[in-house]
Image (tube, rainbow, N blue to C red):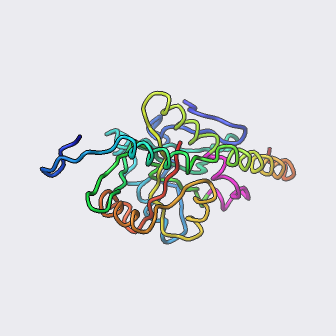
Amino acid sequence: MKPMNGITIFVSKKNKRKIAEELISGSKIPYAQVEKDAAEAKERIKKRRMAEGTK
Amino acid sequence: MNLLKNDLYYCEHLADTKEHFRLIQKFKIYKENGQGLKAYLMDQAVYDEIHNFSRTYLVRDNATHELVAYFSLKAGLFSLEHGLFVKQVQAFPGIELSNFAANDAYKDVHNDASGIGAIILSDFIFKIIREAQQEIGVCALYIFALPDHRLIEYYTKIGFRRLSARQERQLHRRIKPAYDRDCIFMFQGI
């Protein structure tokens, strides 16, 4: 129960939880995909640098 | 002090050394709509760092120590409205990726531009937010993205999503800072 603008509103805990769960589970950072993209980019950069003789 | 490091780059706090204040003056962004990111780094980032409004990190090349990119993180909160007749607002604690830009001056010299964003996200930004999440309750990473369709596509590819048009309009009205005028709120759970 929270007083807001003079009106007491009952916020359903079940409803709040559902929205939070939807938010969090519906859109998680795709860690694995980004890590894979990063690993590929690092390999590409390292190969290019070695080919160019910069490192 | 090196905060984080991988095979190619390392990441430091802006305020770690005075050398950084000289280094950031060489930061370049060519795109017209990215000039705010350059201005932030040069004119505002140090003030925000000193007053703990935001943490700015510089990503530098291991071999040459050139400035590759920078990003800023700050704690924040966003809220969503729901309910047709009685509006209810639910707040979510999060981390705002408030600035994220590659240095065009570095890209001019090196042919390494492709994939830098993914490397920085994976090896630096994700590590920092995962550590923060161990200490304080944060459930989302969010951004106010420049209204550039290629950028929005890129952020979508790495997992950020937009709200419905109605929710987006409501949220922009409630919490979008003046600095992010015209920008688009995007978020993802962490």
User: Percent from the top left, x then y, of residue B38?
Assistant: 46, 59
Q: Is residue A6 left or right of residue B50?
A: left
Residue sitting nearer the eye, B54 or B28: B54
Write the residue at 41% across / 43% down: B74
User: Percent from the top left, x then y, of residue B63?
Assistant: 70, 41
What secondary structure prevails in the magenta region? Answer: helix
How many numbered circles are shown? Answer: 0
Write the residue at 30% across / 59% down: B174
Write the residue at 44% across / 38% down: B138
Residue sitting nearer the eye, B118 or B42: B118
Q: Residue furthest left?
A: A6
Q: Residue furthest right?
A: A51
Relative to residue B158, is residue B11 depicted above or below?
above
Q: Is residue A11 left or right of residue B164?
A: left
Relative to residue B93, is residue B69 depicted above or below?
below
User: Percent from the top left, x then y, of residue B66?
Assistant: 62, 47
Q: Is residue A5 magenta?
A: no
Residue sitting nearer the eye, B68 or B4: B4
Q: Is residue A43 left or right of residue B95?
A: right
The part of the chain drawn in magenta is: B106-121
Relative to residue B148, is residue B45 depicted above or below?
above
Q: Residue furthest top?
A: B135
Q: Quadrant of the rendered structure where residue B152 is?
A: bottom right
User: Percent from the top left, x then y, of residue B117?
Assistant: 63, 53
Q: Is residue B115 magenta?
A: yes
**The N terminus of chain B lies in quadrant:** top right
Write the residue at 70% across / 54% down: B115
